[in-house]
Amino acid sequence: MRRFASSAALVIGWALLAGVAGMFLVRQVGVTEITFVAFVVGAPYLGVAAIVAVILFAAARSRIGSAVAVLITVAVVGVQVPMFLADGPDNTGPQLSVLTVNVAHGDADAASIVDAVRSNDVDILAVQELTPEEVDDLQAAGIDDLLPFAFTAALPVADGTGLWSRTPLTDGIRLDNFGFVPVQAKTTVDGQDLTVVSFHAMSPATPRHTTEWAADLARMRSIMETYQGTVLVAGDFNATNDHRQFRTLASSPFSDAAAGAGAGLFRTFPSERPLARLDHVVTSENVRARSVEPLPIPDSDHLAVLAQLQLP
């Protein structure tokens, strides 16, 4: 009986390790096959499976299995550790409060968004899935009193995006050749010039949409590289930090604010029982992220993300 238990532990342990190693490889490489794109969302939990494998190999007294399992555990846990470690330049410039929210086809409660802007002294609001009706609701709730400058591309269903700002927005344009319609504008905060984007990547819900999703992220990165001065891209990227495509977009000379703030593995979607952080604020790496946290917005299927930043 003991021999059977030991054999079973070995079989289960190697099966777990094979699955963990395979998904870790997919995470690192950035495969765009739809099933793998979905499974990569669960990458933070690979460490649990790897630790179970360590226990099984220890129970079976397999030195080789234990050694391999420990190495894989260190690897899969190690890539998540930086999300808990604050890092960034020691800035002394002006502080900037940024809020990004997906308003769920324009159904999110506009008054709650305006309340969040007011209570958190938000300087820049980025909105995705912005409809004309949601613009009307935001204005009726008093958004223009708090953030008097706006540039929007309000469109039906999920296509629209928008920006509101405490400081004047200039040179506003819609960005072409995306699944949805990002908007970009410039602003100046205490003498520092910023390019600001409200971004919404295609949802990788079908094989065709997954291809468009990867293209959206790659194209946004290419556009970001053309900007002069400080860059701020906020929105629904439909990707987590475990997707290689997002990590490439947020790599030097840019950075994910949540990683910079050491915000950990908080999640934003779906709002009722969040499984993945799809919503991000990405900045030039010379911006210090002081804190990044989720905020609930009634009637949205995403949690909003509030980032407290400090400019150089």
Image (cartoon, helix red, strand yellow):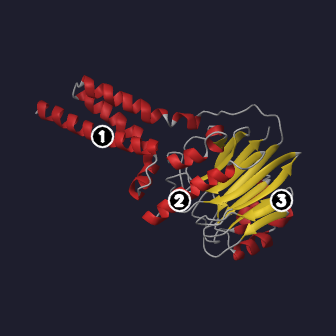
Asked if residue 204 shows in the view, the reply is no
Q: Amino acid at mark 3?
A: Leu
SS for tag 1?
A: helix
Q: Are marks 1 and 3 in contact (CB under 8 Å)?
A: no
Q: Amino acid at mark 2?
A: Trp
Residue at x 74% of width, y 40% of height: 287
Distance from disc 3 to disc 2, alpha carbons, whole Å, reads 28 Å
Distance from disc 1 to disc 3, alpha carbons, whole Å, reads 52 Å
Residue 42: x and y in percent read 44, 48
Mark 1 or 2: the one toward you: 2
Crowding at dot 1, Cα within 10 Å, few <14 / some 14-19 / many 20+, comes out as few
Residue hosting label 2 = 213
Nearest the viewer among 260 and 2 is 260
Residue 116: x and y in percent read 73, 57
Displayed quadrant of residue 300: bottom right
Residue at x 74% of width, y 51% of height: 98
Instruction: Tell me the quadrant of the picture where the C terminus can be found.
Output: top right
How many tags in the picture? 3
Residue 34: x and y in percent read 42, 58
Crowding at dot 2, Cα within 10 Å, few <14 / some 14-19 / many 20+, comes out as many
Name the N-terminal-most of marks 1 and 2. Answer: 1
Q: Amino acid at mark 1?
A: Ala
Residue 15's place in the image compared with 226, above or below, is above
Residue 288: x and y in percent read 73, 38
Residue hosting label 1 = 18
Residue 225's place in the image compared with 4, above or below, is below
Crowding at dot 3, Cα within 10 Å, few <14 / some 14-19 / many 20+, comes out as many
* 53 displayed left or right of 283: left
SS for tag 2?
A: helix
Residue hosting label 3 = 169
Q: Residue furthest left?
A: 1
